[in-house]
Amino acid sequence: MTAMFVRWTSRKRRVPAYGYQGKQLRDHSSPWGFVRTRRETNTQDVHWRAIMVEAVRVDGKPKQRHVAYLGGITQSAIAIIHQRCWFWDRVTQRLDRLRNRILPEDRRRIEAAVAQRVPRPTKAQYARCVRDRNSWLAGTNQKLIELRKFRSVTGR
């Protein structure tokens, strides 16, 4: 087995994924009296991608071979607990699928490298995320049930 590690790549976003959406500029031709600019935002967001790679040699030169995309998150979303829970669910799911390719000590090292950039939620935070998601799903399911009843009564 070759050495596996995480490579982080980034790209700047025009608009923050979460938070302030840009500066307001006066524009008298606009029906609202102003326009929002996207390129000159006060806080430009960065999207981070965690990619698992392995070190190999091709023709005697060291190269990085792409193994798997672990997940992506924006800088503004790292502060939101629910987004971190979702991100870590995805990373854990991807690493579980790769268990035949990576050793347990490599997995621990990879998870530690990801946790340096995106902190892992505590058990209490994760339990809150699960509780919030389940209550949201229950409300959504209740609305669907009511909609189905309405459609069956009205024939729509």
Image (cartoon, rainbow, N blue to C red):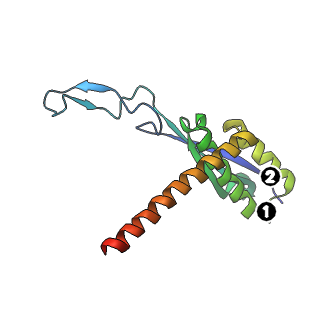
Vertical position of residue 9 compared to residue 23: above or below: below
Residue at 82% across / 48% down in the picture? 108
**Which quarter of the figure has residue 60?**
bottom right
**Which quarter of the figure has residue 39?**
top left
Q: Are marks 1 and 2 in contact (CB under 8 Å)?
A: yes
User: Which element type, helix, strand or loop, lies under badge 1?
Assistant: loop
**Residue under label 1:** 99
Q: Amino acid at mark 2?
A: Arg
Residue at far left of view: 29
* Horizontal and vertical percent position of residue 142: 49, 59
Using residue 49 as the reference point, say whether residue 121 is left or right of it: right
* Horizontal and vertical percent position of residue 62: 73, 51
* Horizontal and vertical percent position of residue 93: 69, 58
Residue at 77% across / 42% down in the picture? 112
User: Which element type, helix, strand or loop, lies under badge 2?
Assistant: helix
The C terminus sits in image quarter: bottom left
Residue 5 visible here:
yes
**Residue under label 2:** 107
Vertical position of residue 59 compared to residue 87: above or below: below
Marked residue nearer the N-terminal end (1 or 2): 1
* Horizontal and vertical percent position of residue 30: 16, 33
Q: Amino acid at mark 1?
A: Arg
User: Observer-nearest residue: 21 or 98?
Assistant: 21
